[in-house]
Amino acid sequence: MRQQHRLFPSRPAALAVVAVTLAANLGLAAAGSPSQSAPRWEVFDPGVTESLRGLSAVSADVAWATGSNGRWLRTIDGGRTWQSGQILGAETLGVRDIEAFDGLYAVALTIGSPGRIYRTNDGGYSWDLVYEDDRPDVFFNCMDFADRDRGYAVGDPIDGRFLFIETTDGGKNWAPLSAPHRPEPEPGEAQFAASGTCLQATGNDVWIGTGGSVARVFHSDNRGRRWNAAATPLQQGSAAKGVFGLLMDPDGHGIAVGGDYSLEDDPTDAVALSHDGGASWSAEGITGLTGFRSALASLEGGTDVLVAVGPAGTDISYDAGRSWSAIAGPGFHVTRAADDGAVWAAGADGRVARLAR
């Protein structure tokens, strides 16, 4: 959604890489459930100052992040050292999402016009421009991959339909779906480029969270060819409100987080649950969330143990999102979980962290 930041085009080129030694590794105490040890954030200083909103958690050792000014960064040793650089020619672009498959191969998405996708297969030492849409109204928000080959990116409406493109070859080539297959918004409905987590793809299923005039979750069970939309009880009715982050599990349980990003400490209508694959959503009985939240991740797979982050802080739930308690420490824009269970987060001022339990 455009109110996040409006960015301007420049030329793609090779990049310079700087290895940065870790300057800080701070363990921050946290509140946990009585039956489990309290989690804490290990906060790293990767040596960059840009706001980070794109994050890909590959493992406990490997994580990538992206942010403003064409910035990308990567660790392959669990945060002890970091490599970082700018995608040269994209220094004025916000790289709001990144999906990485290992320590070498990653795909990065920029937001405003021109909307671009870059790909690296050498750990960020070089980037190829693989997709560009320079229409003035283009504004991408989120990207996700169902597997190593098939991925999607979604953006604000153009010509009465959400922008929706896909790749079937791991991000080497991208193409838009034709208009009849793209989801149709209500007037004033869009998405948020706050954390890159308003889109989730798993198998043939794709979910999109929206906000603005209404806060809804779109679901397709055939790779984006047909869509159903479900209302959520999250805050809505203005450009700052709606669904910012989604998490769905294979059993049909889902969590949507968001609220009003202009009121970071307001937890009102900031989380909702689904038990039918996103066909319906409810906030009944949910307690303890402490503020607006822009993304969430699972600590153990599924949706039983969750962390939700926002600029003002972090909350944890041990009961699938029904009750929450705060984790002490800084806020973040985005959090992601790796296949091995490692949970990473990234946020303002180049802040990156990994959850320790």
Image: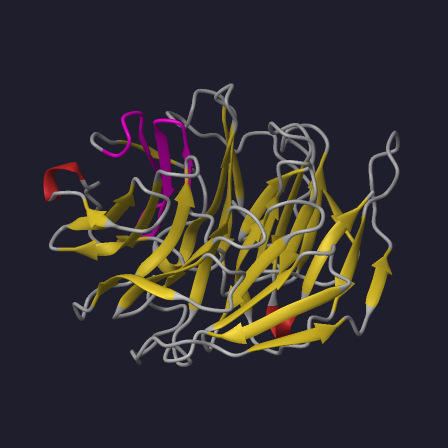
Q: Can residue 329 be seen?
A: no
Report the residue at 31% width, 69% height from top: 112
- Quadrant into which the N terminus falls: bottom left
**In this picture, is 76 found above or below 36?**
below
247 left or right of 265 in image: left
Query: Magenta segment, which residues?
Result: 200-224
Q: Position of residue 226 (x, y in %)?
A: 21, 29
Is residue 215 depicted above or below 131 in this figure?
A: above
Position of residue 272 in the picture relative to residue 127 (left or right): right
Instruction: Provide residue 2's location: percent of width, then percent of height.
Output: 33, 67
Quarter assignment of residue 225: top left
Q: Residue at x 39, y 56 (%)?
A: 192
Residue at 82 percent across and 45 percent down: it is: 39
Q: Is residue 356 above or below residue 231?
A: below
Callout count: 0
135 left or right of 276 in image:
left
Q: Quadrant of residue 307?
A: top right
Residue toward you, 84 or 143 = 84
The spot of residue 157 in percent (x, y) is 21, 54
